[in-house]
Amino acid sequence: MASKPNIKDLEWALQAINSASISLHSISFFLTQPISSCYQETENSININVSTDEESLRRFSQLLKAIGESNSRQPSLRNLDFQRVSWDLQQLKCLHELLQMNFNIKQVVFQRNRFGADGLLELSEMLKTNAGLKEVNETLEELQIWEDSIGSRGAEELSKMIEVNSTLKLLIILDSHSITATPLISAVLARSRTMEVHVWTGANGDKSSKVVEFVPESSTLRIYRTDLPGSCRIACALGWNSTVRTLDMTGVRLKSRWAKEFRGVLEQNRSLKEVNLSKCCLKDKAVIYVAAGLFKNQCLESLYLDGNWFSGVGVEHLLCPLTRFSNLQNQANTTLKSITFGGKRTKIVRDGITAILQMLSSNQSLVNLGILDDSSLRQEDIIRLFKSLERNTTLRYLCLRGCKGVEGDAVLQTIMETLQVNPWIEDIDLSKTPLNDAGKTEGIYQKLGQNGRNVPEMDLLKDMALTMPKSCRVPYLDHVKTLIIPVEQVVRAEGIKIKTIRDDNTKISIWDLAGQHEFYSLHELMFPGQGSACFFLIVSSLFRKPHNREQKTPTEMEEDLLYWLRFIVSNSRRATGLQSVLPKVTLVLTHFDKVTQSPENMQVIARTIQKLRERFHGYVEFYQTVFTVDARSSGSVSRLAHHLRATSKTILERVPRVYELCDDLVNMLSEWRTQNDDRPAMKWKEFCELCQIKVPALRIQSRHDNPEKVEMRRRAISNSLHHIGEVIFFQDLGILILDCEWFCGEVLGQLVKLERRQSSVENNGGFLSRKELEKILKGSLQSQIPGMGSKVFENLEPSDLVKMMLKMELCYEQEPGDPNSLLLIPSLLQEGRGRSQKWKMIAPGSSYAGRHLECDDSSHTFLTPGFFPRLQVNLHNKIFHSRSNHGATYSLEKYLITLSINGINVRVELGGQLGYYIDVLACSTNSLTETLRLFHQLIIPTIQTLCHGVTLRESILRPECVKNLTPPRYRRTQHVALQQLKQAVLSVPADSMYDYQHTWSAVNDEGRMVLQAGFDLARDLLSDDDFREVLHRRYNDLYHLAVELAVPLDNNQESPDQLSVNQDELDGTVEPTFDGLAKGVEAVLKRLKIIEQEIRDLKQEIQGLRYYEHRLLTELHHKVNYMVNYTVLIEERKVPNMFYFVRTENYSRKLVTNIISGMTALRMHMLCEYRREMHVVEDQIGCELMQVDNMAVKSLVPYMTKFMKLLTFALKIGVHVAAGMGEMIPDLTREVAHLVDSSLITGAAGAMAAGALGVAAIGNRSRSTANSRIYSKI
């Protein structure tokens, strides 16, 4: 048993502390004992029990002072423990002095102590100022204060404790005053503590009620009661809080002052997801503050404001962040998904319903809308509300509970019509409305269920009917305001002018392109595509100027017409096949009434036009009549108008059919423009809304419908409208241009004519930032015609214009895919031909190559002025959008592209007055073949894809011109056509092909020698691929010639019947006279001479190829030496290692390449096995085999294998020498491999069924004529 402690009085404890007789480490005080006493608990610790009488409490204060003064006497004292102490202010001051004097105390423990309000304040100051305490309680997780009044001052001190304590998990306060809740919850929120808080109030035994609660598990803060200063303080604490997700202040009366603080919360807080401010008596001013906070808020998802006192003004401000007021405006707040307002004291009225309608028609994020217990909305307002939902695709839940305006059949019908075109609404709450009370809502909920059903998969386009188009485009090359007013009365406008004429159901739109040379870069949009409904009018004036009487000469007329005819042919794809349609062209001559000269001049013009007809025959289809327009006579104009109508109808019957929906959509788009202030542009979302409302075939029928397939149908219709010229559809940008004249004139007309700012462009190497380009666009689009700029930017943002320029390849990004990348516009570049041109870096051993691409038919085609800028952009995009650019560099000048890729430096130059040729120059340390492969795999295909109707002829540039970058004017004659050079190489003997030289002429400039005459080897001008192609062509020619000459040799052994027939035929063709016989003999001799010459040519070509044959045969013999196994056993026995079998048929010998059991009448021959040159022994009789059995086959297999390998090599070499077709000869050793199969050895039937028999014909010729030739017949 433990010994009973030695109980002593307090005096002993005081002496022990002062005398240092005991080295104390710890002292514990207990103030709940009936008698004061003390005892030594351990060697270094004592326990002091203090009773609650006055004398003992005085002794307790003396002990505290003694401990404070024993700093030197008790240096080991570290811990003080106080249990069940009810502290008064005087005792706390003593404790404070103790801690200030005795710095050895490191730990003070309070267990079940009591502090008053002033006591807590003193304790807080004590702990704050003390520098000796090292251990603070960090394990407290729960603090409950019941039925006490700590007051506002105590609450403030307790809040300070909460601020520094991070371990407290539960705080429960039951106080007589609700004011204590504010500082406590504010501290919890300000420090983002995950502490559960419950604050109750109940004074003088009254029923308690909750003031505030915070539950970290649900991140919900509910405030039930607070005053105005308290609500503002809580709002300030919420500003940077990260633990509260839901704030519920339902029923708390709030003022605009609180709302002003809450605005900051909405702007700063990033965690608040739901706010419930129902029945908070908020008025207009307070709601305006809340709405202002929503503009910057990007996290709140639900907001409840029902039961408040604001009016339509408040609703208007509240919905403003959720509304777009322009197609170009972005919605300010896109995160708020649910909003609820209304109530008996909320007056929405006219301003409010207008704001609601605008929000519903433009919002793109709201999912849940609630309007509760409203009596201000009338029946007409509810109808307008549901009409606005027809275009809304995001709202899923609509609550109109208790709204008095939801009544009547008109409202019911409107709801049903809305649900017919809007399947996205999932639920409508109409409880407590007159319509629901009348029992008329059953059909609504039934329709909501139908909209959620699964629909069968639709076929994308097969069920969409086709019809003949009703719209025809007439691009014409002059400017006519109407068909009656003459040209000279019209003032030319910027851009493309479009005139529309309607004839019954046919729409004829006339597109004027003349004189606008800067618009040719946009021909993909303006120039009709292949198969489109269009034809061309070339309108030319007979006079030089509209107000001048001087008539054009026939030469001038020819130049005008020739230019536009070449333009049409160059931009039209060449007609191929029987079904292809040539571009239709009609010529119109104006000012015919002013012609006063003799008719001979008009006849010359007529002959000129006829020459052009003949020249462009097969390229365009001319109308047989040339129209002359006389301004004084309406008859000439009526004939032209009749021609337009008739030709349009004819073309519409021939072109491909379009979808029937196109005609309906054309009318719908026209109505849409009328309803929307004649807007010329339409967003893709607006087009989808129109389809959803107006076009059942393009409507999403159910929420579970496949939107991607409906989207594809809509895009197919849009592309069809684009094809027939009704709209311009930018699919990637999601924009439809409805007014083509506006777009081509006011938008594109300025994009291609941007003014360059020298400083900004030149300092950045020609590049512009997006912001700077947008400024240029704004300046250009607003500086021409008053009012035009505002119309453009009401429908298109500057960023949209930049995207269009990228799409149409009018500019490109320096860093593709980077939204902050600089842009380069080729049309802003300066010409650099006056500068000195040189290669940037020339490494030793560099090779130079160049190709000259010229229009093959320059009399009919040319490269249009807009071609090269688009090439500059297209080539850049093709290189840098691929993954294999390998650090490529790219730079531009006006008519020059400079790039470096894969170690090859390339220059692409545009030349010629009308750009009829392009030079591609390269300098590289790579081989010529690698450089030319880059040309033919990247550069030339890119050039060819951008000129549809132009065929380019490829020529080889003189390497010296490429090396020295000779100016284009001096290298006009320094190129040779690629095919011409190949043909020249083919024309020389075979032994001279490799050394063929092309000679270049000299170039003089006014007596000064610019380039000396010289030559280059063909093998240095052609790539390995090209030279190999030439050799293959030579081999093919020799092979086919050999086969042609060998045919009579195979068929010369004819039967007597055939000889008699041939003789009769010959006799039948020769007259039985001396003259007839002489002519027959002459014809035979002539044919013999031709055959003799062909044989000589063949011998000459074969002689030239002897070198290759000799090398291959030498290599063959070298390999055969390793193949033949001359073992000692074979040498000793003298056994032949190489032999073959032949079969005689009709005076010819057939080489047997496969033997099977049962074969008869074979003759075996031996090869001469001389090691250096194995060969067939001429005139060898051979050994006859009467029959081959299974044993013989098995014995012969090993030897036949070696011989077949030799034969395979020989055949490959022979054909390779003839035509380079060695890979086409099969390996005959596979035939021998079949011999080891027992199924093939057992009998001949199986082998014949497998087709394993191969024979070769050996032509028997004398040694003096030629060596033996072997022809494979497999």
Image (cartoon, grey):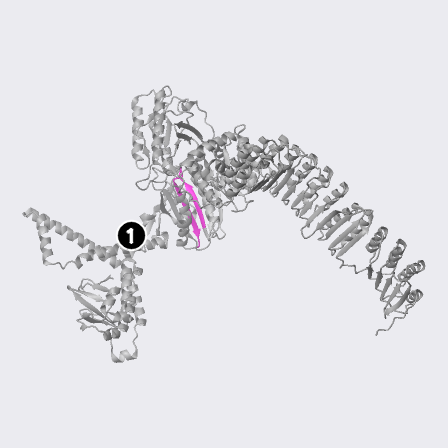
Closest to the observer: 490 or 1268?
Answer: 490
Residue 508 picture quarter = top left
- Relative image position of residue 7 (x, y in whole percent): 90, 69
- Relative image position of residue 610 (x, y in whole percent): 29, 30
User: Is 769 located above or below residue 589 in the figure?
Assistant: below
Specify whether residue 614 is in view: yes
Going by the image, does 1088 lie left or right of 462?
Answer: left
Q: Is residue 212 magenta?
A: no
User: Is 745 located above or below residue 711 in the figure?
Assistant: above
Quadrant holding the C terminus: bottom left
Residue at image mark 1: 986
User: Is 477 located above or below residue 874 in the figure?
Assistant: above
Closest to the observer: 988 or 216?
Answer: 216
Going by the image, does 794 lie left or right of 712?
Answer: right
Quadrant holding the N terminus: bottom right
Q: Is residue 920 magenta?
A: yes
Secondary-structure class at tag 1: helix
